Amino acid sequence: MTRGYIVIAQNNDTTDYLEQAYALALNLKLTQSTVNNLTVCVDTNTKKLITQKHKDIFDHIVDIPWLDDAEGKDWKINNKWKYYYMTPYKETVILDTDMIFPTDVSHWWDMLSEKDIWACTNVKTYRGEPIVDNYYRLHLKNNDMPNVYTAFFYFKQCPLAEEFFKMTQIVFENWERFYFKYMPKGKPEWLSADVAFSLAIQLLGIEDETTMDHMTELPTFIHMKSRIQNIPTSLVEDDWTKSIPTYYNKYNNFKVGNFQITYPFHYVEKHWMDQLFAWMRLERIKVTGYKIVKNQKLRLDFKNAKMATVFALKYDNEIKKKIFRTPEWS
């Protein structure tokens, strides 16, 4: 438990971030051989939604400390400077809740641990190509700032990280003044965690210590924002799921646009995870719960035996494997 992942899950009127965190936690337990711990940080309102299923799968549930800086905001990123004070781990990777890992990246941790802070600066399209389009990040490029992505951000409990997060707090709490002073060639009109983290790195003069732009294979992830997929914008809608299909086989084996996904997958569109169980809803199969059991198996609890049988028969037929022929399914 000295290493682990951490997310903030603060629900708003449109998005169930707690359920995304739950899906991520299940996914990590199923795909990661060694480091599969997930700490979930919640506000008072989201905490009220936590049930036993969440407690069974989350390794830690942490109250966001002090005041909720994101209270009343739709885009709840204002508490991200608090990660250093919320993590229970000696080594931590920050994630976004809308991510899953199709393959095991546990071996990344030994490489990451060579630095006190390692900010991801290179991400990929669904085809596995480096993203070169700056559609969403012109402010960073124009102001010669580090190309930081907070959706995969490693840090240790150490003096450098403590100093960094103190600076990040100052930027978060005074972001408009910092943007005005340090981004003369253009700035966003909203608080961005990526921009705030980038500014903190630049102001502390630690870019060489915290980034490695030439490292393109780790840390990295597939970023599914539609305008940066290295394809003509006329061929993809703002919601990428309307233009690019996903083909599921199982939780760690799926394709997007006929390309096998092997890197951590930042799906962005919050409804994408629903597709995984869409056919179950069409078959009127009711899942009452699911959890990790021994040998890293995913156990599904159904409303009745008939639904379990329908699920088993359909799933067996789709992947040509008899994986449900156990006493639990008889």
Image: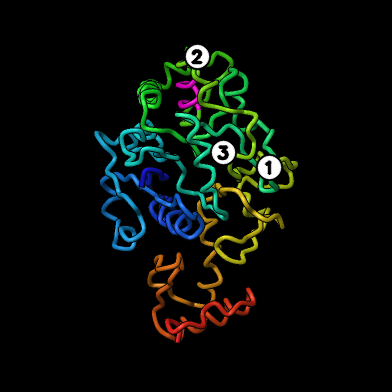
- Within 10 Å of disc 3 (Cα), the crowding (few <14, some 14-19, many 20+) is many
Q: How many marks?
A: 3
Residue pictured at 46% horizontal, 68% vertical: 297
Overall secondary structure of the magenta section: helix
Residue 9, above or below 284: above
Q: Is residue 187 above or below residue 90?
A: above
Q: Nearer the viewer, residue 239 or 33?
A: 33
What label does residue 275 carry, if any?
none
- Is residue 61 positioned above or below 190 on the image? below
Residue that label 2 marks: 182
Q: Is residue 41 above or below residue 22?
A: above
Q: CA distance from mark 2 to mark 1?
A: 29 Å
Pinpoint residue 296: horizontal percent, then vertical percent.
45, 64
- Residue 219 badge: 3
Identity of the amino acid at label 3? Answer: Pro
- Rate crowding at label 2 as few (under 14), some (14 to 19) or many (20 or more) other CA atoms within 10 Å: some
Q: Position of residue 117 (x, y in %)?
A: 46, 29
Quarter of the image where one finds residue 176:
top left
Residue of label 1: 229
Assess whether residue 200 is covered by the magenta stretch.
yes
The kind of residue on which mark 1 rests is Gln
Looking at the image, is mark 2 or mark 3 earlier in the sequence? 2
Looking at the rendered structure, the secondary structure element under dot 3 is: loop
Q: Nearer the viewer, mark 1 or mark 3?
A: 3
**For the magenta stretch, what is the residue range?**
195-201
Residue drawn 45% across the image and 40% down it:
93
Alpha-carbon span between mark 1 and mark 3: 19 Å
